[in-house]
Image (tube, grey):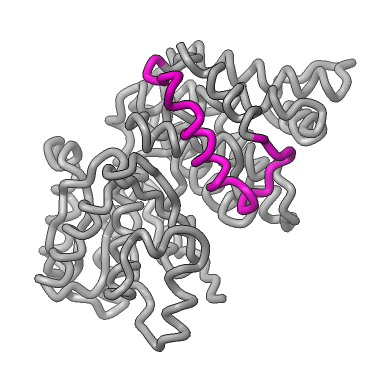
Amino acid sequence: MPWIEPTVIEGPGCIGKLPAAIKEKGFTRVLVVTDAVLMGLNMLDALFDALKAAGIQYALYDQVQPNPTIENIEAALKVYKDNNCQAIIAFGGGSPMDCAKATGARVARPNRSVAKMRGLFKVIMPAFKMGSLIPPVLFAVPTTAGTGSETTIAAVVSDPATHEKYPITDPSIRPRYAVLDPMLTVGLPPHITATTGMDALTHAVESYIGKFYNSRDTRQKAVLAVEIIFKNIENAYQNGQDVEARGQMLRAAYYGGYTFTRGGVGNIHCIGHNLGGMYGVPHGLAMPVIMPHVLEWYGAVAHKPLSELADVAGVSKPGMDRPQKANAFIQAIKDLNTRMNIPDRLDCIRDEDIPIIAERALMECNPTYPVPKIMSKADCMAVIRQLKA
């Protein structure tokens, strides 16, 4: 399979370097995928000015919803085709990036629906077999430090008709460029800073405790992500103008995305995806709420890796044994949530929905995700009940 690491462009103001990278690839017409909130804040003005100055024409799709839908993807695809675009810029958080990735997949597979690309390797493998095109080059510009989508092979899609939220996972949709400009994140509200940062932490934790064989590089990046987040997230939360903390959080989010691309995620994500699909719970909020509950459910099977992360995060104390360190790490996550005003429960969960949420979560998780311990439906339902306010 093709496995190309994104070219990283980083540093304050580095968004101005993106047009040169686009021109270097020979592209003159691009689709920009973003959302109405970012447009309303005029956050794309610098990008638009730089594209114009470089002689690059752009078409715009700015109606991505917080949980991008199939309708969003099809609408973006139409704009891409109508304007004869050659590449895609994803500008925003995980939702615009997911929409852009899935749009690129539809460009490559015009006769295959989004639903048919659900799951693993449903884009590039059939494309190779049929002699189809691979997706267009994607330039990813994150404006939150959380999803790590600028380096992942996954796009998460919502289907309003069925209230399902599921991933499309394929190496061909991975961005080729990641633009990590902390100046694009300095205006993030504290709540978004907190929840997206905890999403990045979830990526690092789930990949580190998972059962895939991970390379030393992958495990090191998970460790770095945890270390960076514990050192910087509260600084970024309390002072949004702290450019150094913002840049560090972008780097941690990138590491988190890198490590779960190779190491996988787990039950935290599969439950979170389905709470998002059922109720529209923002992904960044779902992750820190769910994470302590699932980590506690894993129990002894996760104590070793969690105890190692406790040392990295600086929350263990001399004389602690392995279970005590693991529990200290889980408590540190709860304490971070409390200090950043993230709730420990969700008030949207209805008892009658819990069985279908559990079924869908486990359908996504098993056997794809390398979890430390397999959940039964009863286990999953019990954890979801704990999340109910």
Quarter holding residue 279: top left
The one nearer the camera, 232 or 325, is: 325
Residue 48 is situated, as x and y percent measured from the top left of the image, at 14, 55
Q: Is residue 1 visible?
A: yes
Quarter holding residue 31: bottom left
The one nearer the camera, 380 or 187, is: 380
Quadrant for the C terminus in the image: top left
The answer to whether residue 38 is left or right of residue 369 is left
Q: Which residues are magenta?
A: 347-376
In the rendered image, the vertical position of residue 374 relative to residue 3, given as above or below = above
In the rendered image, the vertical position of residue 65 relative to residue 53, given as above or below = above
The answer to whether residue 321 is left or right of residue 312 is right
- The residue depicted at 36 percent of the width and 22 percent of the height is 191
In the rendered image, the vertical position of residue 111 relative to residue 153, given as above or below = below
In reply to whether residue 336 is colored magenta, the answer given is no
Residue 258 is situated, as x and y percent measured from the top left of the image, at 55, 53
- The residue depicted at 41 percent of the width and 65 percent of the height is 173
- The residue depicted at 56 percent of the width and 76 percent of the height is 1
The one nearer the camera, 19 or 342, is: 342
- The residue depicted at 85 percent of the width and 25 percent of the height is 322
The answer to whether residue 155 is left or right of residue 198 is left
Q: Is residue 340 visible?
A: no
In reply to whether residue 352 is colored magenta, the answer given is yes
